Image (cartoon, rainbow, N blue to C red):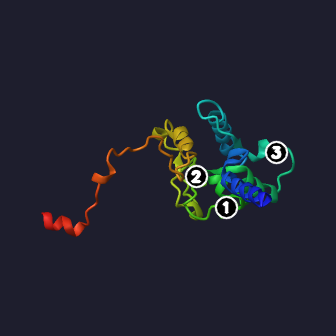
Amino acid sequence: MSVYRFQKSTIRNILLHRMDNFDYDAFVIYNPHGKDQEFVSLMTQVLTSPPYNLRLYVPWSDNNEPFEAVATAENIEKRCKKVLVVISAESMESDLFHFQLRIAHSMSPSAKTRKIIPIRLDGTEVPDMIRFSTPCDYYKQDLRVFIWDRIFASFKDYSRPKKSKSKILVENESNCSIRPCWNLYKIL
């Protein structure tokens, strides 16, 4: 009986903490050529330093082995909480970009988990499969001041409500009564 309880509690703990045991906060999907690479290096500098302190998985700088599709799918699924998608004209022409984007979309097919965070470097439209997400527009000069805070805010977990530490105390519960709504019409 105690072994069963141990197994049951262990399985429950694994399921409860599955979302919290990631190596990285985000996987970065981008085209490693041109201005995409420059932006990703700037983004990595800003978001990995204080006050943000995020852990970003950048494929061409974090792994030393040859890039493989299976490794990408595993890294997106098991090691990263979210996916940052850097969208530009060059990235839209890359087959590897579209492959990684399809993998990321298959991990969160609806907007409920909000796993994909698109960042637009130019006026290129967001791909149809992730158009449900609001993109961060880096190409707009007046919004650049807020982009790092917007990206960081998207990492907050709004799905679980915080438990309140304060308790509501009722002095005399016998005086508390709830009247049916049809009785209220009689009073009025």
- x, y percent for residue 32: 73, 47
Circle 2 — which element? strand
Please tell me whether residue 81 is drawn above or below residue 143 in the rendered image.
below
Q: Is residue 19 left or right of residue 175?
A: right
Q: What residue sits right under mark 1 in the picture? A: 107
Instruction: Answer above or below: position of 39 versus 108.
Output: above
Q: Secondary structure at mark 1?
A: helix
Q: Which residue is mark 2?
A: 118
Give whichever of discs 2 and 1 has the lower sequence position.
1
The location of residue 178, given as percent across then percent down, is 28, 60
Rounded to the nearest angstrom, the CA distance separating label 2 from label 1 is 15 Å
Query: Looking at the image, is mark 2 or mark 3 earlier in the sequence?
Result: 3
**Farthest-out residue, top:** 50
**Label annotation for residue 63:** 3
Q: Secondary structure at mark 3?
A: loop
Q: Position of residue 147 (x, y in %)?
A: 52, 40
Which picture quadrant has residue 74?
bottom right
| Marks 3/1: CA–CA distance | 21 Å
